[in-house]
Amino acid sequence: MDPRDPIARIQRLVDNGAHELIIPRTDCGMVAATGSIKNNKVIIFASDATKQGGALGADGARVIVAAYKAAMAEQLPIIGIWHSGGARLS
């Protein structure tokens, strides 16, 4: 797996690589998941550097909003992993 892949990056961060996607993965360039770090549940979102250099578009922003909503609803910390060249302006 490409080390820039957001799932690979999330798996390296959470306990035993265990995570659960908040919404199904698409090609929008952003992934959001739940996992645990040192047995503490967290919400994580990560940009996908393999998709247009990790540039953020509207669909990717919706994934981030879903991550924040989940974190607020469950009162959990949220972590953002960015690997991006900027924004998608089209």
Image (tube, rainbow, N blue to C red):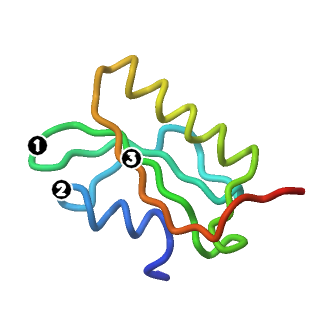
Residue type at the position of mark 2: Asp
Q: Secondary structure at mark 3?
A: strand
Camera-side residue of 1 and 66? 66
The amino acid pointed to by label 1 is: Asn
Q: CA distance from mark 1 to mark 2?
A: 7 Å
Farthest residue in the top direction? 73
Q: Tag 1 or tag 3, which sits nearer the N-term? A: 1
Please give left or right for residue 73 compared with residue 62 in the image: left
How packed mark 1 is, by other alpha carbons closer than 10 Å (few <14, some 14-19, many 20 or more), is: few
- Cα gap from disc 2 to disc 3, whole angstroms: 13 Å
Q: Which residue is mark 3?
A: 44
Q: Nearer the viewer, mark 3 or mark 1?
A: 3
Examine the rendered structure and indicate whether residue 16 appears above or below residue 50: above
Residue plotted at (26% across, 61% down): 13
Residue shown at 48% from the left, 46% from the top: 32
- On the image, the x and y values in percent for residue 78 come to 35, 39
Q: Position of residue 31 (x, y in %)?
A: 53, 52
Which one is in front in this view, the residue at disc 2 or the one at disc 3? 3
The residue identified by callout 2 is 15
Q: Position of residue 61 (x, y in %)?
A: 65, 42
Q: Quadrant of residue 11?
A: bottom left
- For residue 46, above or below residue 67: below
Image side of residue 22 versus residue 77, left or right: right
- The mark nearer the N terminus, 2 or 3, is 2
Circles 1 and 2: CB distance less than 8 Å?
A: yes
Specify the amino acid type for callout 3. Answer: Ile
**Snapshot quadrant of residue 41:** top left
Q: Are marks 3 and 1 in contact (CB under 8 Å)?
A: no
